[in-house]
Amino acid sequence: MVAPMTEVDLRRLASLSVTKLHGVGDKKAKGLAKTEIHTLLDLLTHYPRKYLDRTKEAHIAELMEGEQASVLVTVENTTSRRIRGGKVMINSIVGDDSGSLTVTFFNQAWRERQLSAGRQAVIYGKVEIYRGRRQMTNPVVDLVGDKTGRIVPVYPQSEKAGLHSWDLAEWVGEALRRTLPPAGRGMLDPLPAYLLDEHDFVTRGAAFSGIHQPESTAEIAEARRRLVFDELFRLQLALVLRKRAIERTEIGLAHEVDGPLLNGFTKELPFDLTGAQRRAIDEIRRDLARPIPMHRLLQGDVGSGKTLVAVATMLAAVDGGHQAALMAPTEVLAEQHYAGIRRLLEGLTVEASGSLFAERPLRIELLSNRVASAERKRILSGLLTGEVDIAVGTHALIQDNVLFGSLGAVVIDEQHRFGVEQRAALRDRSYGDEVPDLLVMTATPIPRTAAMTVYGDLDVSVLDELPPGRTPIETRWVPAPGSLDQAPDDGGGDEGDADGLSAAEIAAALEELWDDVRGQIDEGRQVYVVCPLIDESEKLEVASADATFERLREVELDGYRVGLLHGRLTPAEKDQTMELFRTGHLDVLVATTVIEVGVDVPNATVMVILDAGRFGIAQLHQLRGRVGRGQHQSTCWLVGQVTTDDGGARLQALVDSTDGFELAEVDLDLRGEGTILGERQKGRNDLKLASLRRDRAAVAAARRAAIDLIDADPGLEAHEAMADELEIFLDTEDAEFLLKG
Ligand code: ADP
Ligand code: MG
């Protein structure tokens, strides 16, 4: 490899193979390839997993029995022997200046090779003392190699690939020597100078050196801050560029946003809009007035009043002589929307085309697979001629034979159930050339900064305020087994049971729960009981729901009218049961999570979720949202013994808060961004250091910076290095994928 003549940019690093580095033989090269490290860029962005500060490691002689400790040691010798059952036991004697320690592994024969005499390693585990000797069993081992620096980077290493942390440190060192001064001319910094200034960032070269070969922990932090921003900035640039490209190429409708329908509707409402609704409608009005198609996400908790915002959007389209469509993920939801919207818009009229001054009633139709074919024909023809103003429906709306005369606005409810293709498909159903405006609604809020990443191609409006007069749902957690016929574990262990209740206390809490349920029914209210979630098989889940149903009918809810709803029933059976519950002919609905989305029975005031520890925060919050929809005080009972701290924290979060946005933040804290980005996306994007959880402020800063830069220089013509870098990291497919959320 020749010292570069000009500043090295990432493209150049991406063109140089790691096999050119000293000490990368055939075998190591294979290991590198397996680890997806092919180029110097891959190598330099293979960041240390952690750092060891040698001055801070404990000494063996100081280790206390029972403590979790990490010590830096040198291996003295390692032996292996067979024990009963054909298993292998490895014993390694390791030491430091202060003493020695026995480390034992079971069934990890490869440790004998790993821990050969003379190797340096950091050992992390629980200290045991046996016959006066300190020892650890199956500790975590990081081989660090014989380094002399104070701070030693520890790289993610793969024993299988035959790569050790010290190999990586060595190669990274060589790569840096060759690209950074004095040997090379330094590393190109593509970030505009004003951003470096504004954020007081170190240069790119200093950042790579600081993350791999730090002199101090402060240097690591500064390096990380810079590299995190780079990752997020590239991502936001790609997202914002994509958004602007769509805005440039799609021709939309400039809607009438001050028309009689919309104005009349908001004026005639029997209540005031919430501040959040007013803000969202204003944002949407502004979008609708522009000839650029709207792409907006409306996030709002269950009950925050998204429907009104959707209706306002659709009326604006109708005001201008166009049509609107609302697509929901299930028949039940579509029917509910249809009924609700008809009620809201009762009595409204529109100008009848053809005859001046004549008016006709606003026409709303429901299109789902349940609509009989004669009726369907009539609706389809009305859509084409424009006589149908608003269509509400399911996937039936995006079938080939559906064509709107002039579709002006599209609303999609419960966005995560539909893919990007389906969003696009509905917008394609218009006969007109203009692309309809799009509003996507979700009742599963995600944190703002996460939304900027996952929905980077959408503008976001937030309904973070509930209409007045709601009584918050009271949530209680009973740490009993999720299955009703199972005896409770006596609490008090260290497994993270709620408060270590005794079996008798748990039984009393359950008694209180079913007392409350019976009391509510006696007052005329209704109750949901959600059965344990069984991922492995629907058959098992149905069997368990059946068992819960039988048990409740015979024991806890003997004498009450109990119905059962699960995924194996025919649609007709489901309908019938739902209808019985809706009309008050059932007191209790025992159900699997099929009721998760959208069912609206205001008289239902108790939600019992069995085995609640199995559900995620968002899902529990959704389920809880099925109650608290009428004027009566509602209660949600979470029944479940948890086995992890996280499980306990999840259920406690539900007890502590009814705010979906707050819960989304907790969820992000507990589970990380994987759940939001999805595993596939996480694996493919360029976020190696940045975390949507830890780096929230950086996400927002990067988004702002990306918008500013692209507003000032839409083609990135004055920022060629930046544009070039985007291409390296985000190939089209990735960028495309990121947009799917
Ligand atoms: P979401 O779809 O967001 O869950 P909805 O649009 O179904 O919520 O609204 C829930 C309930 O609140 C409906 O009964 C609706 O009529 C009522 N509502 C909506 N906005 C207001 C408001 N500003 N003031 C009072 N009630 C409202
Ligand atoms: Mg809704």
Image (spheres, rainbow, N blue to C red):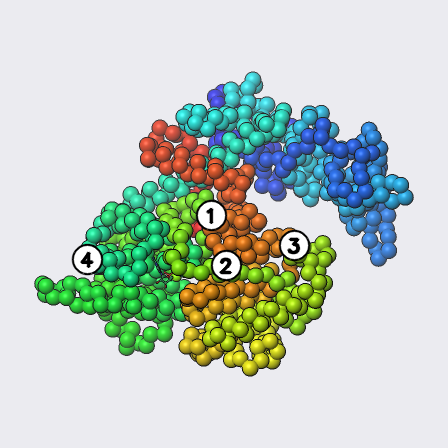
- Horizontal and vertical percent for residue 469? 39, 59
| Residue visible at 38% across and 48% down in the picture | 460
Farthest-out residue, right = 131
Looking at the picture, tell me which residue is in the foreground, 38 or 398.
Answer: 398
Q: Secondary structure at mark 2?
A: helix
Amino acid type of the residue that numbered disc 4 sits on in the rendered structure: Pro
Residue beneath disc 1: 447
Left or right side of 346 for 440: right
> Badges 2 and 4: C-beta atoms under 8 Å apart?
no
Q: Secondary structure at mark 3?
A: loop
Residue beneath disc 4: 260
Q: Does residue 256 lie above or below 115 as drawn?
A: below
Looking at the picture, tell me which residue is in the foreground, 681 or 653.
Answer: 653
3D distance between C-alphas at marks 3 and 4: 57 Å
Amino acid type of the residue that numbered disc 1 sits on in the rendered structure: Pro
3D distance between C-alphas at marks 1 and 3: 24 Å
Residue beneath disc 3: 644
Amino acid type of the residue that numbered disc 3 sits on in the rendered structure: Thr
